[in-house]
Amino acid sequence: DRKLLMIPGPIELSPAVLTALKAAPPSHVAPDFIEIFGASLELMRQVWGAGPKSQPFIIAGSGTIAMEMAVANVVARGQRALVVNTGYFSARMAEMLRRRGVEVGEVGAPAGKAPSLEEIETALDSAQQDGRAYDALFATHVDTSTGVRVDAQAIARAADRRGLLSVFDGVCATAGEAFEMQSWGADIYLTASQKAIGAPPGLALMVFSERALEARKSLSEPPPMSVDIEQWSPIMQAYEARKGSYFSTPATSLVCALFASLSEITAFEASGQRGIGPRIAAHQRCADGMRAAWAALGLELFCEPDLSANTMSALRYPDGVDGARLLAGIKARGVVVAGGLYPGRQDEYFRVGHMGHVIERPSLLAKTVRAVGETLVENGHPADVEAALATLR
Ligand code: PMP
């Protein structure tokens, strides 16, 4: 008995993506597959808002591999990076940078909050004044541990104005949150296949700007071969030119699923508009609806409401409600949500993903709200389930 997966990734897949997954894995140099790979790279440029001189990459791997590729290709031992730390995944990014021998500065905030633009700019400028200017800035677009979204546009512009590379972890954001790589002057936007991109886990996806490609060329030591974009760029360029090429076998089945999903995302239509913009607006509408439903159930957000993401909600357990019992009761009603993830604060809240295919399925959203609401009532929290469901309509 399969349960509805409402965690912040992996997510429920659309019927078209499931169909794409059913076929036997094609050869990586079959003409049909070359077309699918090349077209997927082109669709990524649309979803990322990336310019013609940028380079998209589709690599077998997880979001963590995408983070590793970003780190390994733009900075090396002795360089400096500023990490905008909004939680668990920013901390991972900082640790990756340290392991690469990079000197890391951090500008953070308490759990559920984000540093202001002013704090970030001050950190950049004071390092510059001390003669220790940063080479790159790293930020997590949506931190999945808290549901906090940073102002990626303002941060990218602040870095760009200072001639600094900016790298954004979009694993819990890409295709669900606005991001315009070229017009904002961002240099790397990375994600994984299993969240708002709407495919199964297993693909690391990233787009490098021209400046990020140049940064790799001027590194003092090359990255490990398997994550080196100098190995991968010619392969991606060949596929985009509809030619087969080989460096390391692509995850062919997953690329077929990715193509199905990117095709749906870029063909998305709402109120007479088509493409990624309306798709993101639909995520925002869905998030607003879910948030109204949570409020009607008497639940509070773990993060500052102004910072809450389109793609997920982090919700405090009400006083007197046992977290483990709540999650078990929700599961017994056929819906899987996730526990907390912020180090030391895991027992205070739970997380619900609302991204991809489900945003257009009111019945699945209602099932989720009902499961959470009924379990709250069962656990002694007076929640008005019908009022919550009414806010969704
Ligand atoms: N960054 C963020 C913001 C994430 O949410 C995740 C996964 N939850 C990752 C990185 C790591 O991705 P993966 O689990 O695919 O390695």
Image (cartoon, rainbow, N blue to C red):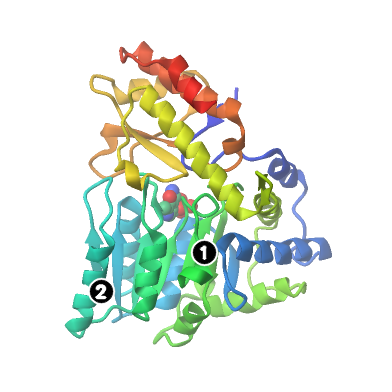
Rendered residue at 44%/88% (across/down): 218
Residue 124 marker: 2
Q: Which residue is mark 1?
A: 180
- Under mark 2, the amino acid is Leu
Q: Is residue 52 above or below residue 249?
A: below
* Badge 2 or badge 1: first in the primary sequence: 2
Q: Is residue 115 above or below residue 393?
A: below
The image quadrant of residue 312 is top left
Crowd tier of the residue under label 1, counting other residues whose Cα lies within 10 Å: few below 14, some 14–19, many 20 or above: many
Quarter of the image containing the N terminus?
top right
The image quadrant of residue 107 is bottom left
Instruction: Report x, y in % for residue 235.
Output: 66, 75
- Under mark 1, the amino acid is Glu
Rendered residue at 47%/75% (across/down): 224
Rendered residue at 65%/44% (across/down): 270
Q: How many marks?
A: 2
Quarter of the image containing the C terminus?
top right
Instruction: Report x, y in % for residue 329.
Output: 42, 18
Instruction: Report x, y in % for residue 27.
Output: 77, 61
Crowd tier of the residue under label 2, counting other residues whose Cα lies within 10 Å: few below 14, some 14–19, many 20 or above: many
Q: Residue furthest front?
A: 272
Asked if one can make out residue 219 in the rendered structure from this viewpoint, the answer is yes
Q: Is residue 21 above or below residue 67?
A: above
**Which of 148/106 is in front?**
148
168 sits left or right of 82 in the view: right
Rendered residue at 60%/49% (across/down): 278
Asked if one can make out residue 196 in the rendered structure from this viewpoint, the answer is no
67 sits left or right of 162 in the view: right
Q: Secondary structure at mark 1?
A: loop
Q: Secondary structure at mark 2?
A: helix
**Which of 256/130 is in front?**
130
Residue 35 marker: none
